[in-house]
Image (cartoon, rainbow, N blue to C red):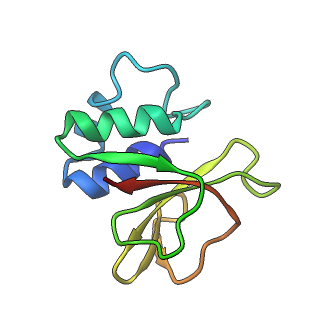
Amino acid sequence: MGCGVACVASLTGLSYSDSRLLFAGRPGDDHHRGYSRKSVILALAKARLRYEFRRKVPNVPVGTIVYLKDATWPKGHYLVRQSRGWMDPFHERITSRLPGIPRSYVVPA
C-alpha cells in the first residue's frame, strides 16, 4: 500500500523514506490502509508542488497521479503518468496501459 508514497517520491525526486515523512500526521499508512487522495495532495504541497483533485481529466498530463479502485485493486492503487507511460510502483515498472479504470485524478494545479 505504499503506492501513494512511491508516486510522491517519483514526482518530488525524493527517496521513498524522505517522501514518507511528507505524510507525517496524516491518517493512513504505507503498509495496510494506504493514504487518501487528500493526503497525497497535502504531501505534494509540503514539497512545494501544487496539485488538485479531479474526477475526470480528458487529456492526462505528465505528472498526474491516477487512483484506481476495482476488483483487481479493492483497497485502491495509485500510478503516476510519465512521458513513457504509467509508473506502476506495485509492479516496479513503466506500463503503456492503465491496469484498471481510473476513479479519480490528482493533477498539477
Picture mark count: 0
Q: Residue 80 location, x and y as percent?
A: 43, 62
Q: Residue at the spot x=70%, y=65% of the render? A: 101
Q: Is residue 40 above or below residue 80?
A: above
Residue 22 is drawn in which quadrant? top left
Q: Residue furthest right?
A: 71
> Which residue is pictured at 42% across the width and 20% down the height?
26
Quarter holding residue 75? top right
Q: Which residue is at the far top?
A: 25
At horizontal 59% and vertical 53% (from top left) the residue drawn is: 55
Q: In the image, residue 19 lies at what x, y percent?
A: 28, 39
Q: Residue at x 39, y 50 (%)?
A: 6
76 w.r.t. 82: above or below: above
Question: Is 9 or 81 nearer to us in this picture?
Answer: 81
Residue 48, x across and y down, in percent: 17, 41
In this rendering, the answer to whether 7 lies above or below 46 is below
Q: Residue 59: where, in percent of width, then height?
A: 48, 76
Which quadrant is home to the N terminus?
A: top right
Q: 101 or 2: which is nearer to us?
A: 101
